[in-house]
């Protein structure tokens, strides 16, 4: 086994040698070729389309409009509404899920034996349910007439009349977010439970010897250890939620009005209902740039880890 | 590595497969192959019927082979538009509503006028083909007719103290009837109407807008911020505020509720009878005692309107087998076998013909529901300004309808916001 002392000079040698390495290893060219086709080509083609007036139904050829589609974006109130909705949906869902996941991971940390396994299995169940199924399940639970949630609230006397959860502009987004949070929390439970298990016993024991209280233990010992896991899982989920189409489409199709229209829903409507591929591509480029920023943040976080 | 014993076996099998592929080509070479893109084969309820119709067609037309391509209803227009663009459209396709005109906008649909003989044209209902013109050319043949009617549940009306044989004739009468129903049966949805954000919902709401005199889309003449449109939006808001409608549901989601007497009035197509009976197993005679269908109650315009939700058949201009494709289209729309097996079967709709082609089908079409649709509802058909602008505009208009129904923004503001979006498009 290589000792730490022995490993250091080896790493130095490796770093010194990188200068002599060819800039492109022939062994990676097949992978690069595949990536160029499946990732590079669609991106380049989207960029090309984004500067054209291109409608799939039009018999005319696509027309170069320069930054015309981007200019239209700036004055399109639905685009800005969709961007705002995307931010609320993404960051709101991730923040609440992360907090819930953290709380549940801490609560179940010391549960052992059969009871612990059963609790963890139950907590992870929502993660195993396909997102479209989750969306339809909640859609029917939210129904004004015959929905389980209204039946429960009416039975408990919390509300006097059924609430139209998905059909009131102010309630639709929170209702969709609750569904998303329900589906996403198990992911955080899983990641954070694993990270909690990875905290060295010596650290915990020494804190106990110092008579650290529960809250102090959580805030000063455990949370610093969980920081990277939280950051990476949150960034992953932000990227995932930014692209979330299935849940919103199955539950509200972006309505009522535009109250749950996110960027992905707006792009879909522009491209596949209005067939305005040029304008949809311009929105897609903006969306791609935003995702790229999150991806860079994620890669940096990974490097920090 | 292959063993020497296995090698000849593999070569032998390959030779057999190779010779079989030639045999297959020989069979196919004798026949004209027509590709038929449709959603009838994609849905469990209609697949057996369409398969049977195709098998019967192939039996009576041994020189034509039909290659059915199942594509879901919600995907077919998109897929056909993409296939047209990439140069491989099918020969024939099933389409409906705005999708027919969206695909026609590609300029790749074969005009069917020249194929329509005077004799065959005289067999078709004039209302059925008048709405299928695009740039003054007939671009589709009606396969099934499925206009929307105002269905009324006689049992629910009677319970509310209303005369079950006198459905509301005006918007005022409808409002009064809904109030009585809401009061007597709070668990019943007084009016089932589709308020989702999709082109079909605009098509479904178009007759309601029309009866208020509103035409939010019609080239330069249409205005979404007209006083008529505002009156329609105000009416929709009142319906929601009073709990007379259940917003956000697709029309299909109301049908099982209608079967359980949880819906009093429903704005739906002829297929509703089949759905209700498949859910509650009600015999025909009981159904006619329980449900009736009539024309839409009239609004300020004083006129009733309806929309045609049936299916059409189109032929693509790139088809190399146009004669065979037309033979197939005609067979689907007008042959007694296709009408019996598909149109009146799981399709639960009306044939596009003036008269039933034989006494057996005439007897099948002599029900009170079919008679109401044929005699009173079909003459009220109105065709919205279908086309790409309708698809684009439907999103803005239905989002506005949803805002009116579910929000508290002033109606004036909503109407002008819809118009601004339409202007931008």
Image (cartoon, coloured by chain):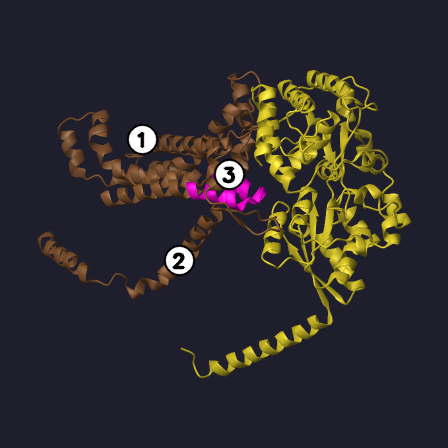
Chain colours: A brown, B yellow
Residue drawn where x is 42% and y is 30% of the image? A88
Image mark 3: chain? A
Q: Which element type, helix, strand or loop, lies under badge 3?
A: helix
Alpha carbon of mark 3 to alpha carbon of mark 2: how far? 27 Å
Q: Main SS type for the magenta part?
A: helix
Q: Which mark is residue A107?
A: 1
Frontmost of labels 1 and 2 is 2
Q: Is residue A89 above or below residue B413?
A: below
Q: Which element type, helix, strand or loop, lies under badge 1?
A: helix
Q: Is residue B128 left or right of residue A172?
A: right
Q: Which element type, helix, strand or loop, lies under badge 2?
A: helix
Q: Is residue B116 left or right of residue B201?
A: right
Q: Which mark is residue A137?
A: none
Tell which of A132 and B200 is nearer to you: B200
Q: Is residue B111 left or right of residue A276?
A: right
Q: Is residue A62 above or below residue A136?
A: below
Residue drawn where x is 50% and y is 83% of the image? B8
Q: What residue range appears in magenta?
A: A263-286
**Residue located beneath label 2 in the image:** A36
């Amino acid at each position: 086994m290589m000792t730490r002392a022995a490993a250091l000079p080896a790493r130095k040698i490796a770093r010194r040698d990188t200068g002599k390495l060819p800039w492109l290893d022939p062994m990676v060219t097949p992978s690069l070729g595949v990536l160029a086709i499946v990732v590079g080509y669609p991106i380049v083609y989207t960029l090309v389309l984004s500067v054209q007036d291109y409608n799939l139904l039009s018999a005319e050829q696509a027309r170069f409009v320069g930054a015309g589609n981007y200019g239209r974006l700036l004055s399109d109130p639905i685009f800005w509404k969709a961007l705002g909705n995307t931010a609320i949906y993404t960051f709101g869902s991730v923040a609440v899920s992360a907090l819930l996941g953290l709380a549940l991971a801490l609560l179940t940390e010391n549960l052992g034996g059969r009871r612990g396994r059963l609790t963890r299995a139950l907590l992870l169940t929502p993660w195993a349910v396909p997102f479209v199924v989750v969306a339809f399940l909640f859609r029917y639970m939210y129904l004004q007439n015959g929905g389980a949630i209204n039946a429960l609230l009416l039975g408990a006397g919390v509300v006097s009349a059924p609430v139209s959860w998905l059909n009131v502009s102010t309630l639709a987004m929170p209702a969709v977010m609750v569904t998303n949070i329900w589906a996403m929390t198990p992911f955080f439970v899983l990641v954070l439970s694993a990270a909690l298990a990875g905290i060295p016993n010596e650290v915990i024991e020494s804190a106990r010897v110092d008579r650290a209280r529960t809250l102090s233990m959580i805030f000063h010992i455990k949370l610093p250890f969980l920081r990277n896991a939280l950051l990476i899982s949150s960034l992953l989920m932000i990227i995932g939620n930014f692209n979330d189409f299935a849940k919103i489409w199955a539950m509200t199709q972006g309505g009522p009005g535009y109250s749950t229209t996110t960027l992905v829903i707006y792009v879909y409507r522009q491209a596949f209902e209005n067939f305005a591929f040029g304008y949809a591509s311009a929105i897609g480029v903006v969306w791609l740039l935003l995702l790229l920023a999150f991806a860079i943040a994620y890669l940096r976080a990974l490097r920090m880890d | 590595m292959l063993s020497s014993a296995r090698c000849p076996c593999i070569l032998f099998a390959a030779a057999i497969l190779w010779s079989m592929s030639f045999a297959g080509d020989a069979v196919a070479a004798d026949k004209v192959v027509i590709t038929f893109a449709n959603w009838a084969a994609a849905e469990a309820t209609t697949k057996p019927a369409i398969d049977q119709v195709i098998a019967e067609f192939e039996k009576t037309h041994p020189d034509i082979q039909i290659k059915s391509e199942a594509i879901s209803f919600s995907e077919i227009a998109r897929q056909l538009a993409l296939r047209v663009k990439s140069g491989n459209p099918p020969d024939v396709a099933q389409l409906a509503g705005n999708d027919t005109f969206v695909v026609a906008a590609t300029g790749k649909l074969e005009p069917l006028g020249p194929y329509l003989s005077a004799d065959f044209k005289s067999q078709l209902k004039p209302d059925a083909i008048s709405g299928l013109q695009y740039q003054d050319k007939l671009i589709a043949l009606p396969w099934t007719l499925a206009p929307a009617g105002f269905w009324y549940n006689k049992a629910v009306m009677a319970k509310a103290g209303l005369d079950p044989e006198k459905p509301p004739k005006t918007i005022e009468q409808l409002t009064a009837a809904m109030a009585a129903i809401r009061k007597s049966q709070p668990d019943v949805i007084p009016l089932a109407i589709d308020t989702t954000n999709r082109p079909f919902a605009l098509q479904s709401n178009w007759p309601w807008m029309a009866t208020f005199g509103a035409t939010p889309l019609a080239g330069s003449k249409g205005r979404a911020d007209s006083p008529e449109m505002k009156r329609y939006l105000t009416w929709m808001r009142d319906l929601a505020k009073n709990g007379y409608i259940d917003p956000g549901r697709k029309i299909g989601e109301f049908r099982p509720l209608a079967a359980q007497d949880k819906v009093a009035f429903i704005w739906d197509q002829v297929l509703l009878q089949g759905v209700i009976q498949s859910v509650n197993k009600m015999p025909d005679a009981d159904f006619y005692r329980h449900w009736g269908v009539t024309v839409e109650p009239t609004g300020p315009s004083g006129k009733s309107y309806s929309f045609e939700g049936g299916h059409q058949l189109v032929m693509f201009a790139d088809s190399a087998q146009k004669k065979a494709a037309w033979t197939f289209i005609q067979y689907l729309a007008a042959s007694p076998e296709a009408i019996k097996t598909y149109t009146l079967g799981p399709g639960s709709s009306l044939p596009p013909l003036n008269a039933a082609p034989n006494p057996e089908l005439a007897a099948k079409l002599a029900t009170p529901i079919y008679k109401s649709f044929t005699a009173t509802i079909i003459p009220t058909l109105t065709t919205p300004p279908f086309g790409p602008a309708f698809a684009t505009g439907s999103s803005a208009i239905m989002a506005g309808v949803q805002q009116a129904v579910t929000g508290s923004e002033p109606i004036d503001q909503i109407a002008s916001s819809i118009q601004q979006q339409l202007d931008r498009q």
